[in-house]
Amino acid sequence: MGCSISPILFVAAFEVILIGAGKLVQKQLREGLEKIDSSQLPGKLKVWCYQFTLFQRVMWPLKVSEIPSSLVSRIDTISNTYIRKWLGLPRCFSDTGLFGKNALQLPLKSINLGYKQEKTRLVFELKESRDEAVKSAGVTVCTGPSRKPGEGRQKTGRTTCLLTPGKGWKTRVDLGTQLIFPTEITQTTLRPDVVVWATAAKKVLIIELTVPWEEGIPAAYEFKRLKYSDLVAECRDGGWTATILPVEVGCRGFVGKSAIQLLRAAGTTEVSLRRAIKELAEEAEKYLVYNRCYDTYQLSLKFERCLESDVVTFDILSEDSKLVFLHIDRYVEFHSQHGHYYKTRIPKFGRDFSYHYPSSDLYFVGASSEVFRLNLEQGRFLHSLLTDAAEINVCDINPVHQFFAAGTLEGRVDCWDPRVRSRVGVLDCALSSITNGTEVEGLPSVSALKFNGSLGMAVGTSTGQVLVYDLRSSRTLLVKDHYYGLPIKSLHFHNPLDLVLSADSKIIKMWNKDNGKVFSSIEPQANINDVCLYPGSGMLFTANEDPKMNTFYIPALGPAPRWCSFLENLTEELGENPESTIYDDYKFVTRKANLGKCLSA
């Protein structure tokens, strides 16, 4: 007696055996992931445990067993879900962001990639075996079919090219000049980022670029699509074939699927597509907003955190890394040791804030006549301080008697007593800053403010003057002009030498607070945003329009900090071997002085 079996039934039975082995691997992986997830370890350590223990344990059965690649893909999806959860990433975060060579570059390997590598390694082990019997046996490695039994192969279609050649396409971009939507299509006040249209074919493409936080990519896509839906309907009513194409590139450099679809719809080749994706990621990464904290004694980076939007200013509330960030989109973000803690929003756009330690109040000033008060102990906003100003630019709190001062757009400084919430004085700095020889084009506003002790105060104006006051008098003690006409951005007092350090975007000037005599000046190559003077030393840092902070050490101001005491030896060596320049024997005179000498001769 004999028996036979249909080839179709044999293939089906073989797939059942393979899938059974794969289900066992899937069960072991899921149990391991659940054990790691239930532990009390931080998310990063959970990922480490997975990558160097569970991942290696799963790779062996995947290598020796003939498991279908479709089942391996499902196993890979399970593990990636847990990795996103442990790293705090959104569900929409792509596998390319996790395992690809991009801005993040995590030291992770996907199960899918590991499966392919192990199978390739197995092929070479069999073909290049030292055992001639194995080498000549012609053993083949089978990964199993990647589709279910009975299913045919699905044809993979490519995205239809939207830009048909030879149609006379025109382009307008909302960059540099304000974009006006083509009137031949329709009239609207909306301003998309890019408009591409062909009059002959009556086709129009509306492209809108968004750079959101990765978690907000799906919401940003829907928001932009709904925003321009009425415009698309108007174009279609006029006989045009209109298409809205929202494009998202994550603020951390991860390119969304919508951007890839747009590039493919434009007829981009695969080589150019990969190059474009890389350039998009690099450009988005350049404008990331980072908060970096450095450990000076270790001369290393302590931690780095990425923020969602540009920061106007920030402050350190305590020594245990409690930080407050004021963003340009009215959000106030609080950070603790572990990272982001809480975020709230103030009623108007903020420009500066100060922390009042006795009452735990944050005072916010900005594009409003009110000074908003947020009490951190009660966790709520208190009654605002009302001023006569249209807008308030800067504020500061005296560290001795806790008076609150606010510099206004009209060039005044309002002083308040937080204990009674009443104004105790007003200084008119706009008129006081105008002296003989001062050229101003408009009314100066207050751009910088700094207290010195209990009675001293320096005020910087938007026209480049620095005014020194004694709070007991409304008259200025000294007016120092930078002569650049640029707003003063930073003010610091150096009490050991009775100096004032004032900075605009071009230069840092150090001068005596009593007579205005210049002590020194520094003119960096990049524009200055802020200056930080290291306490009790001659070192200062500048935040500037450059990838790196500038660091300056002036021995005449004070000694080097303990964590970089080697600078003392360097300066001594430079002092022992001075280098002469070609201008040492020259005497420079001004044009006015030179003209006077010529006339007298």
Image: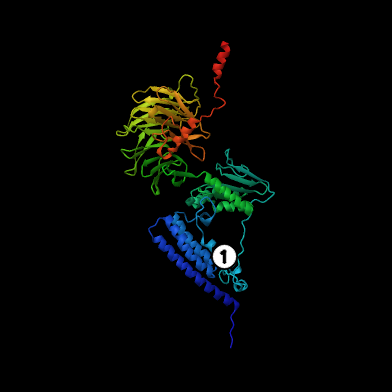
Q: Horizontally, is 117 left or right of 349 in the view?
A: right
Q: Can residue 540 be seen in this view?
A: no
Q: In this view, does 430 lie above or below 545?
A: above
The image position of residue 587, as x and y in percent, is: 54, 20
Work out which residue is located at the far right of the displayed protein and give it: 166
Residue at the top extreme, as displayed = 601
506 or 2, nearer to the observer: 506
Q: In this view, does 87 lie to the left or right of 471?
A: right
Q: Nearer the viewer, residue 167 or 592?
A: 592
Which of the 4 quarters of the picture holds residue 372?
A: top left
Q: Is residue 375 above or below residue 576?
A: below
Quick one: quadrant of the N terminus?
A: bottom right
Looking at the picture, which amino acid does disc 1 mark? Arg
Q: In this view, does 169 lie above or below 93?
A: above
Examine the rendering and report whether any part of residue 560 can be seen: yes
Label 1, on which residue? 121
Residue 555: x %, y % from top left:
44, 31
Pick the residue in front: 263 or 206. 263
